[in-house]
Amino acid sequence: MNKNEFISIKFDLVNGLIQWYTRKYHIKLSELRDYAYDSNEVDKLIMEKGDYVIYEVYEIERPVVEGEMIFGVTRIFPGVIGQEYNFTRGHYHVNKMAGEIYVGIKGCGLMLLQDLQGNFFTEVLERGSLIYIPGKYAHRVVNTCDEDLVFLFAYPAIAGHDYELIKKCGFKKVVLNIEGKPTIIDNPKYNKCKQS
Ligand SMILES: O=P(O)(O)OC[C@H]1O[C@H](O)[C@H](O)[C@@H](O)[C@@H]1O
Ligand SMILES: [Fe+2]
């Protein structure tokens, strides 16, 4: 497929599989160590089970110029890291004018959103959800169900990903499995970060 032409591909809306992409990457457990609620649980799990894949991303890359869009599909496998449900790292966009669209295809979970002023909220992301994220919000997705959570995303190619602040302080809240139920609790790491 010529990168400068239009793109038209098949997309399996039941399983969330795209027929064609230019980049596939995955994030393993060890890469979430700094982002996890309890990094000791990451180490423990790696010792027990090895370093396995938490989520994978199938992306259609486009030139990083104004007007272009990057889009694709993310698949988060089910599971917990200690008590914390599997999640994506989460990031701010470098370009705060660049929003993003998510469409839930399969499974269920929560999207965590927060801005630099400390506003925080969650949205359900499941099959049929359509979420628009304004550019100033950091976003993370958490898989709270027993199956793959699959969603489509699209964002301006010039958005840029900023992981540093999330790596350092995390999101204001984390989603834990407490007695089998997704429970949203305060993240102590975030609170400490704010004070220092
Ligand atoms: O980049 P992460 O926060 O690890 O999330 C993984 C991916 O999730 C979504 O699909 C986003 O739209 C992508 O931009 C992102 O890269
Ligand atoms: Fe994004």
Image (cartoon, rainbow, N blue to C red):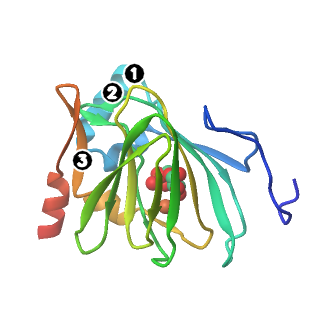
The quadrant of the rendering that contains the C terminus is: bottom left
Local packing at callout 3 (Cα closer than 10 Å; few below 14, some 14-19, many 20+) is: many
Q: Residue at x 63, y 56 (%)?
A: 71
Q: Quadrant of residue 19?
A: top right
Q: Residue at x 41, y 37 (%)?
A: 108
Residue with the mark numbered 2:
45
Residue 112, image x, y percentages:
33, 54
- Amino acid carrying mark 1 in the image: Lys
| Lower position in the chain sequence, tag 2 or tag 3 | 2
Asked whether the residues under the numbered discs 2 and 1 touch, taking CB atoms below 8 Å apart as contact, a structural biologist would say: yes
Kind of residue at disc 2? Leu
The numbered dot on residue 174 is 3
Q: Position of residue 51 (x, y in %)?
A: 44, 30
Say what secondary structure mark 1 lies in. Answer: helix
> Which is more foreground, mark 1 or mark 3?
3
For residue 49, the mark is 1
- Image position, residue 131 (x, y; %): 46, 57
Inter-mark Cα distance, 2 to 1: 6 Å
